[in-house]
Structure formats: structure tokens, C-alpha cells
Image (cartoon, rainbow, N blue to C red):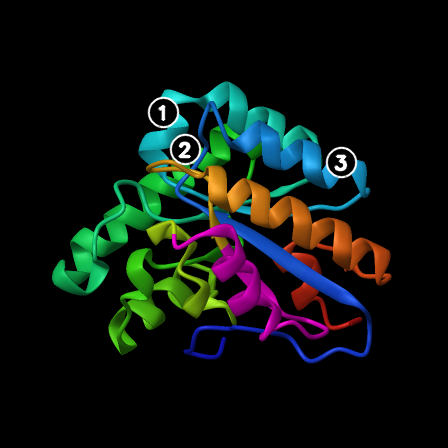
């Protein structure tokens, strides 16, 4: 496994992977599921283990609807400030929670705050995860910079195989929901398909 964050996957197909960090959330996660259901699309939810503890029923709904659940650690720390053993426990605890929902550990992982170094990337690979970044980090939806700003910055990064980052937990996500709704409708009209990150990573693309 390559020791780097994967931000996009070269492909000739009109596919894009939407990803959502920090859920599941009782207010926003289901709204996102509805958006993707309308276009027969799928997304990837990088869930925090502690949030699954609180809202396991929502995590089950996400998985049952065909979306991917991925590892975003158990308590959302900056992994580079932990010992390797502490970081390993964060990944393992999150995987344990994910396994109760899906029956298997997560295939992919995203570090909170994108805080990684060689050791963390190596730990993730050793744990069987590919480490996932994004192309639209400048959209900074977590800062609630406005729907137009999120759209503008994300559109600059759109191409086949892009991995897009948004958030469905830890705060007011109304701007994110609206921006995603607009983006998905537009991309659907342009003929794009919405796939999970693991689907995007398959060599058949």
C-alpha cells in the first residue's frame, strides 16, 4: 500500500466520490442520504467511533442504504500528537464499532485534521486501510464560509475521480447540506455517477 493520502483516482469514467466526516448525526446524515437516494448515488461516511456509540441506528441506516462507512478514528484526535500505540487504539476502537454495524472493518481511513506523518500512514496501511484525502480542502465547509464559497471552491477541483470532503457532524451543517444538494443535482445533470471511495479505488476504473 502506498504511504500517502489519496485525493483522487485517475479514471476516464464520469464518477465522483462524495465523503462526509464526523458523523453519524441525527439531524444531517439522513438529509444527505435523501439527496443521494434521489440520484441513485452512494457516498462514503468517515464516521467517528464515539458518534456511532451515540447513533448506531443511523449508522445502520447508512450502511443498509448501500453507502460506505469508513474509519475516522474513535475520538477524533490529532493522531500525530499521540504515541503510535495510542493511535493504533484509536483506529482499532473505531473499527470495532464499524464492525458491529457492517460486519467487517473499514477498508479506508481519513485522519482527523488531515494530520499525518509517515508513522501514521504506515500504521493505517498495516491496519489494512488506504488513507484518503480530498481535492477540495480549500472549500473548508467545516468553517461555514457560506454556500456560495463552498460551491465555488469545490467546483475548481471537479474532475473524473475526484474525492470531495464535506462534514455531517460536529456543528451546524446547514450550509454543507445546501451546497451538496446543489452540487449533486448539477453533477447528476452533467451525467456524473456518485460512487463510494472503495468503488472508486477498484482497478476496473
What secondary structure is found at the residue carrying circle 3?
helix
Q: CA distance from mark 2 to mark 3?
A: 25 Å
Q: Report if the CB atoms under discs 1 and 2 are less than 8 Å apart.
A: yes
Q: Residue at x 63, y 70 (%)?
A: 162
Q: Nearer the viewer, mark 2 or mark 3?
A: 3
Q: Which residue is mark 3?
A: 37
Q: Horizontal and vertical percent for residue 77? A: 21, 50
Q: Are the two marked residues, 2 and 3, in contact with CB atoms closer than 8 angstroms? A: no
Give the mark nearer the N terminus: 1 vs 3: 3
Quarter holding residue 164: bottom right
Q: Which mark is residue 117?
A: none
Q: Is residue 105 visible?
A: no
Distance from disc 1 to disc 2, alpha carbons, whole Å, reads: 7 Å
Q: Quadrant of residue 158?
A: bottom right
Q: Which residues are magenta?
A: 145-165
Residue where numbered disc 2 is placed = 97
Q: Is residue 16 above or below residue 45?
A: below
On screen, 73 above or below 35?
A: below
Name the residue that disc number 1 marks.
Answer: 53
Q: Secondary structure at mark 2?
A: helix
Local packing at callout 3 (Cα closer than 10 Å; few below 14, some 14-19, many 20+) is: few
Q: Please, what secondary structure does the residue beneath circle 1 have?
A: helix
Amino acid at each position: 500500500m502506498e504511504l500517502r493520502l489519496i485525493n483522487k483516482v485517475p479514471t476516464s469514467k464520469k464518477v465522483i466520490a462524495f465523503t462526509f466526516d464526523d458523523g453519524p448525526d441525527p439531524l444531517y446524515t439522513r438529509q444527505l442520504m435523501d439527496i443521494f437516494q434521489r440520484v441513485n448515488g452512494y457516498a462514503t461516511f468517515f464516521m467517528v467511533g464515539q458518534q456511532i456509540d451515540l447513533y448506531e441506528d443511523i449508522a445502520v441506516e447508512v450502511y443498509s442504504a448501500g453507502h460506505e462507512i469508513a474509519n475516522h478514528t474513535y475520538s477524533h484526535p490529532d493522531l500525530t500528537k499521540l504515541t503510535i500505540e495510542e493511535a493504533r487504539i484509536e483506529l482499532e476502537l473505531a473499527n470495532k464499532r464499524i464492525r458491529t454495524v457492517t460486519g467487517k472493518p473499514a477498508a479506508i481511513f481519513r485522519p482527523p485534521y488531515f494530520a499525518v506523518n509517515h508513522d501514521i500512514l504506515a500504521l493505517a496501511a498495516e491496519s489494512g486501510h488506504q488513507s484518503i484525502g480530498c481535492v477540495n480542502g480549500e472549500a473548508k465547509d467545516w468553517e461555514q464560509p457560506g454556500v456560495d464559497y463552498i460551491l465555488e471552491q469545490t467546483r475548481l477541483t471537479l474532475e473524473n475521480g475526484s474525492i470531495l470532503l464535506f462534514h455531517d457532524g460536529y456543528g451546524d451543517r446547514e450550509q454543507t447540506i445546501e451546497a451538496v444538494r446543489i452540487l449533486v443535482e448539477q453533477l447528476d445533470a452533467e451525467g456524473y455517477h456518485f460512487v463510494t471511495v472503495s468503488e472508486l479505488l477498484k482497478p476496473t476504473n
